Image (cartoon, rainbow, N blue to C red):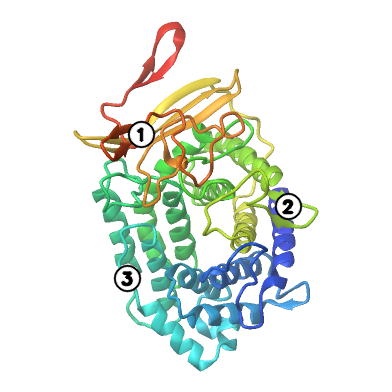
Amino acid sequence: MQNFSNQCLDLARSLLGNNLKHLNPDGTVTPAAGESPRADEPGHAALAIGEFFRASGEVELEGHDLFDLSARCITQQAFNEESHENGLAYAALGLLSFGASKERNAVWERLTDPTREQLDQCLLARSDHEDHFQVFNVAKSVARFSFGLTKKDDTGKVIDRFVERIESNGTGGFCNDDPKATHGVFDLYGLLSFIFIRQALQLHANVHLKDRKLPKLRTFAERYLKLLPDMTRQDGLGWNYGRSVGAYGQLHCISLILQAMRDHWISPEKHALYLDTLRRLFQYFFVTYLDQENGELVIRDDERNTVPNHTTRMANFDAARYLCQWSRLAKVIGGSMAVAAPQRSTTGGRFVAFDKSHRKEHGLFLYRDENLGVQYQLPLIGPGPNATSDNLAFPHCPGIFDWTVNKYLPVMIPELTFGKDVIVPSFYGKNCVTGIGLKKSLYLR
């Protein structure tokens, strides 16, 4: 894994080095052409810089003082008039990356007293969330206790609340990101939630809390982990349905596998399977989204697009952060990636139940036929606040069967009109089963 670790760190250095020039003296981020800045971008930049410091130990990059840049980004995020818990949580973990206590943190020393006071107030102020935003409260709680801003560590309670809502909002143990609606939104943000909590616990000054909470988190994170080998296509395409897929569909999957291997959540007999999955995911990410000539991550061009609130700058800082994280994790895991691909059936399919009741079922049908080169994901999930084709129940198989990203188009699905109401029978099923049909065909009904 040493070669993989070095490759990730080199890529991170290139990405980060080419994007630090977009950080302004006041900590704001200059947007890419045709895009608008996000309020939480300084926080994402701070965590990317912090992860690079953890992975490399370097305090300068391309002539930039990383301590100074981090302090500026954190200050900007703390005083941002537009409250954004996402950015504040990322900034808090970025600050913790330079030291788990304020007495041994070079960036904390560079923050002014007004900034420290503002940061304390912002970390204390929390809104209770029913969706993935609850994990940002975990990061804020970790930062407050680690920096001695409070003597009471309530991180455990915040994690317990997050887990309780997973159990109450679905029967399958997956994250429903819109529990107040009548439909269930089970998408990539569930994966993000566990990755973010695990990273926050790794930076926590209270090391005993990590040992107490990991078994409970493992129970739910493993459900996502078991999806990945069946979900990953032969060419390495990972999660490709729902919101915010694309580069993030690769990034989150790779991080979860490496975190699980570091924590010994994957049994030795499964190592070859997950290493093969990891190789394919990384290769697809490297070939598809990295512009090696310019040292940038590409999320928008003439052939691809993503959700409007994902900016090019944010995606580049996030990619650099993940690459640094992978470099660190690969060093800890050790061993070699030169493992023969496991022998398994070239065809298969299964329906994964996200939520099941007597009224409706949500889930994901995974099908693959490697002999024909066909592999797709067919979700039965709700659309969330904005109905787009990304959540519709048709075979999601980019490159073979494409659809419009972040737009609504009834692909292969009828629209039923009742008066002025248009209904699309796509967001849930009932009594969903898979089986073997005539001539060894596989069906979902």
Mark 2–mark 3 Cα distance, whole angstroms, equals 40 Å
Q: Position of residue 251 (x, y in %)?
A: 57, 50
Identified at 49% across, 83% down, the residue is 79
Identify the mark at residue 127; answer none if there is no mark: 3
- Above or below: residue 307 compared with residue 232: below
Identify the mark at residue 138; answer none if there is no mark: none
Identify the mark at residue 7; answer none if there is no mark: 2
**Amino acid type at mark 1:** Ser
**Amino acid type at mark 3:** Ser
Residue at the top extreme?
439
Q: Earlier in the sequence, mark 2 or mark 1?
A: 2
- Above or below: residue 37 compared with residue 280: below
Q: Earlier in the sequence, mark 1 or mark 3?
A: 3
Asked if labels 1 and 2 touch by Cβ distance under 8 angstroms, the answer is no
Dot 2 alpha-carbon crowd within 10 angstroms: few under 14, some 14 to 19, many 20 or more: some
Q: Nearer the viewer, mark 2 or mark 1?
A: 1
Dot 3 alpha-carbon crowd within 10 angstroms: few under 14, some 14 to 19, many 20 or more: few
Q: Earlier in the sequence, mark 2 or mark 3?
A: 2
